[in-house]
Amino acid sequence: MCGVQGRAHSNSEDGVCNGVYCMKGTIGNAEKMADLDKLVGRFFGHIELETCRDVSITRPRVRPNASFSADTRVEFSRTLREMFPIGTRFMATVKVCQKHVDGKPHGPPYLKAYDVAVIAASVSDPGLMARVRKGSISGLAYDYVWTTRD
């Protein structure tokens, strides 16, 4: 039974349901997805993502846990990144995307998250929360505060 689309598919490790490649997010799949250039436009289901801090910027980032390289960028809801502590894990369907300028690829391929669900067991209390820095003109500068949920 496919956890992404809720229907049965082939007995292979990777099945296809309505154009979504259903994967379990295991390390074994990482080898199959090493070359993102060849996967642009494809959807992959059941991919585990995690919020993290990036040393080069203040805003919280999201990275894939196992199926893709941890340095792969992920387009992810800003609201969810701010709502949950750093280290919170999510399950999502992702699409491999590529930006273009003048019809030519621009930058590396990245993942765009759809149908995001939080993995409740990963939400720590207390946790390190990202808060928009007071006085930030762009609204993209963050401070991290250790908090508890009420």
Image: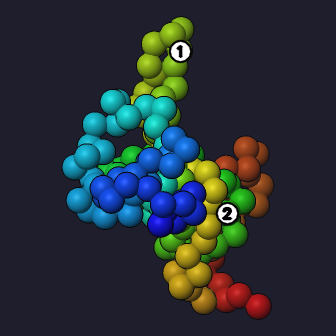
**Residue 131 pos. (x, y %):** 69, 66
Q: Is residue 69 visible?
A: yes
Front residue of 118 and 52: 118
Q: Quadrant of residue 48?
A: bottom left
30 up-or-down from 145: above or below: above
**Label total for image:** 2
Which residue corresponds to mark 2? 80
Front residue of 141 and 81: 81
Q: Is residue 128 visible?
A: no
Tag 1: amino acid:
Val
Tag 2: amino acid:
Leu
123 up-or-down from 51: above or below: below
Which of the marked residues, 2 or 1, is nearer the chain's N terminus? Answer: 2
Residue at horizontal 26 percent and vertical 62 percent from the top: 27
Mark 2 crowdedness (10 Å alpha carbons): few <14, some 14-19, many ≥20: some
121 relative to 68 in the view: left or right: right
Task: Label 2: state its secondary structure.
Answer: helix
Q: CA distance from mark 2 to mark 1?
A: 29 Å
Mark 1 crowdedness (10 Å alpha carbons): few <14, some 14-19, many ≥20: few
Front residue of 71 and 67: 67
Tag 2–tag 1 contact (CB < 8 Å): no
**Residue 66 pos. (x, y %):** 34, 61
Residue at horizontal 51 percent and vertical 71 percent from the top: 89
Which residue corresponds to mark 1? 101
Residue at horizontal 73 percent and vertical 50 percent from the top: 139
